[in-house]
Image (tube, rainbow, N blue to C red):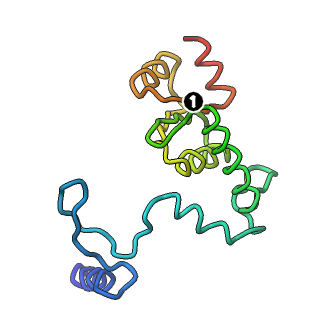
Amino acid sequence: MIDALNATWDAMIAEGQPFAMTETEVRGIPMRVFTSAPPDMRFIWEMSAGHGDKPYIVFEDEEMSYGEAHATVRSLAAYLVERGVQPGDRVAIAMRNYPEWALSYWATICIGAAVVGVNAWWTPAELEYGLSDSRPKVVICDGERLERLNEV
């Protein structure tokens, strides 16, 4: 069984295959990387724009298309830039698994900022520590997390 698995793996990463690998230097360290990997996460998001009216996310009785999601991400990204967020800055996302979490993630990635994922179960004291330790320029949160933040 393991021989078959290894043979399949070797075939998948061979030159000319979809998961072909090569060695390159990343920040001074030699690493194996996928030859055809997208350059960054923004590229992956932008590839999804072609899906237009197809459903992107469904939450309870609401559905958002890829087109609507892209418009929302562009709007939020512009808002973050207007608020002074620049590439390399940190943006904390503190909310439950709402559709807005994913949209906030993509907006942050698209402007070159780093996402700081905040555990939605954290207490006010844990939120205070996590945010003071990570020092995000902006916090995007839902109402429940905002109430907890107001306690500190």
Q: Residue at x 33, y 72 (%)?
A: 34
Q: Residue at x 18, y 57 (%)?
A: 29
In percent of width and height, residue 71 lies at 73, 54
Q: Nearer the viewer, residue 44 or 10?
A: 44
Q: Residue at x 30, y 84 (%)?
A: 8
**In this picture, is 68 found above or below 49?**
above
Screen quadrant of the N terminus:
bottom left
Q: Residue at x 39, y 24 (%)?
A: 133
The residue wearing badge 1 is 139
**In this picture, is 88 found above or below 28?**
above
**In this picture, is 135 found above or below 28?**
above
Q: Element type at marker 1? A: strand
Q: Nearer the viewer, residue 149 or 50?
A: 50
Q: Nearer the viewer, residue 56 or 39?
A: 39
Classify residue 31 as left or right of residue 105.
left
Neighbour tally class for label 1: few under 14, some 14-19, many 20 plus, Cα within 10 Å: some
Screen quadrant of the C terminus:
top right
Quarter holding residue 20: bottom left
In percent of width and height, residue 131 lies at 46, 24
**In this picture, is 89 found above or below 3?**
above
In percent of width and height, residue 90 lies at 47, 35
Classify residue 136 as left or right of residue 17.
right
* Number of numbered discs: 1
- Amino acid type of the residue that numbered disc 1 sits on in the rendered structure: Val
In the rendered image, the residue lying farthest to the top is 152
In percent of width and height, residue 97 lies at 61, 43
Quarter holding residue 148: top right
Classify residue 44 as left or right of residue 78.
left
In the rendered image, the residue lying farthest to the right is 61
